[in-house]
Amino acid sequence: MATGKYYEGVGRRKSAVARVRLFAGSGAFTVNEKPLNDYFHLDTLATLAQTPLRATQNEARFTVSAQVKGGGPIGQADAVSLGLARALLAADTAFKGALRKAGLLTRDPREKERKKPGLKKARKAKQYTKR
């Protein structure tokens, strides 16, 4: 893990929370102390997590370290993406236009709906039988 001055951003998606730190460096990307492609086994998830760097053309300028907890792989990748976008914004406010245009600064507000009493799931009811 890199040391020294860094920029931090927190991203959330569903029940996943990511704390992303941005260091000046070589372009290494670690998630929970593992390389990005080892942590997110699907290339699409790794690409989703790196989207803010690509939108601002900063793949090789920063070293990224992310700590992510909770949720599943897609929610975690989205949380890392939002945290990275916020950290890039903290590093340089000139990135705001590119990040906003790509839709990377808006948190997805959808959450899992709670289960209701008398139902099997949040909305699924027991099957109705007429006879």
Image: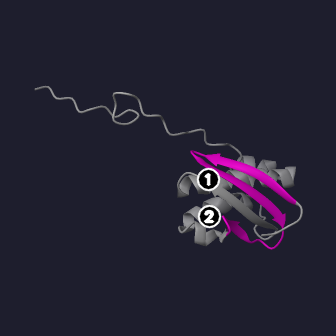
Q: Please tell me whether mark 2 sits on a helix, a strand or a loop.
A: helix
Neighbourhood count class around disc 1 (C-alpha, 10 Å): few under 14, some 14–19, many 20 upward: many
Q: Amino acid at mark 1?
A: Asp
Do residues under tags 1 and 2 come within 8 Å of each other at their CB atoms?
no
Q: Position of residue 30 (x, y in %)?
A: 69, 68
Nearest the eye: 102 or 71? 71
Q: Residue furthest right?
A: 5
Q: Amino acid at mark 2?
A: Thr
Q: Please tell me whether mark 1 sits on a helix, a strand or a loop.
A: helix
- Residue that appears at 67% across and 55% down: 81
Residue picked out by circle 1: 78
- Residue that appears at 75% across and 64% down: 64
The quadrant in which the N terminus is found is bottom right
Q: Residue furthest top?
A: 130
Q: Position of residue 83 (x, y in %)?
A: 71, 52
Label 1 vs 2, first from the N-terminus: 2
- Residue that appears at 61% across and 71% down: 37
| Badge count | 2
Magenta stretch, residue numbers: 6-33
